């Protein structure tokens, strides 16, 4: 897990992208997480390099051709190793190679690059939870069908 300071310029770019995009279909947070999501993409690009693509299927293309979809959650506190990363069940068909996971603090000043996981292994290794189900690992009521994997199972990114 790597702590990253978020420059004001990255937040400004993220806000502009969120305004341009508007509300996503099937948004779990009704669009309230869009700015944080774009900040998460900025953080992942800072850590991983590559080129921003921002398609439905992936957000970055790395120098080796790997397609990365960035999954971001907002947080009030430093993430702990037992916290979960999530991929919504409606995203399982995204044509990417790797998921990168980021937590962005609610104040948009810091973020944590949590790690990466190959897409083909993610669905095999993650726990499937249905909307409304209480996740026994953290007592959280799931807002949408999703696949969860704890942070301590992620891989450290190395270029």
Image (tube, rainbow, N blue to C red):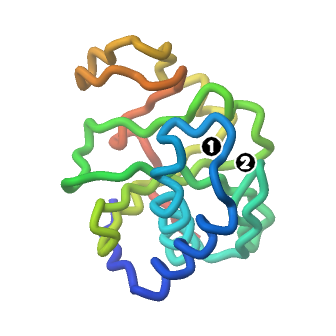
State yes or no: discs 1 and 2 in contact (Cβ < 8 Å). Answer: yes
SS class, disc 2: loop
Q: Name the residue rendered at 49%, 68% in the picture.
A: 39
From the viewer's perspective, is 115 left or right of 65? Answer: left
Q: Distance between the residues labelled 1 and 2?
A: 6 Å
Residue 50, picture quadrant: bottom right
Q: Name the residue rendered at 24%, 25% in the picture.
A: 138
Mark 1, Cα crowd under 10 Å, few <14 / some 14-19 / many 20+, is some
SS class, disc 1: strand
**Looking at the rendering, in which quadrant would you find the C terminus?**
bottom right
Picture coordinates of residue 152, whole percent (x, y): 33, 42
Picture coordinates of residue 118, whole percent (x, y): 62, 43
Q: Name the residue rendered at 36%, 36% in the picture.
A: 84
Nearer to us in this view, 83 or 108:
108
Q: Which numbered marker is on residue 118?
A: 1
Q: Which numbered marker is on residue 97?
A: 2
Residue 149, picture quadrant: top left
From the viewer's perspective, is 143 left or right of 4? Answer: right
Picture coordinates of residue 10, whole percent (x, y): 49, 81
From the viewer's perspective, is 139 left or right of 129? Answer: left
Nearer to us in this view, 46 or 37:
37
């Amino acid at each position: 897990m790597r702590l990253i300071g978020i420059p004001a310029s990255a937040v400004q770019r993220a806000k502009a992208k969120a305004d341009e995009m508007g509300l996503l279909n099937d948004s779990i947070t009704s669009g309230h997480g869009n700015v944080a999501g774009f900040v998460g993409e900025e953080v992942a690009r800072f850590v991983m390099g590559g080129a921003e693509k921002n398609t439905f299927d992936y957000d970055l293309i790395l120098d080796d051709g790997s397609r990365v979809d960035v999954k971001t959650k907002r947080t009030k506190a430093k993430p702990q190793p037992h916290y979960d990363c999530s991929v919504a069940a409606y995203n399982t068909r995204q044509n990417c190679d790797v998921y990168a996971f980021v937590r962005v603090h609610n104040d948009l000043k810091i973020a944590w690059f949590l790690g990466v996981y190959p897409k083909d292994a993610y669905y095999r290794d993650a726990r499937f939870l249905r909307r409304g189900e209480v996740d026994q690992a953290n007592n959280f009521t799931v807002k949408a069908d999703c696949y969860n994997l704890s942070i301590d199972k992620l891989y450290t990114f190395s270029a």
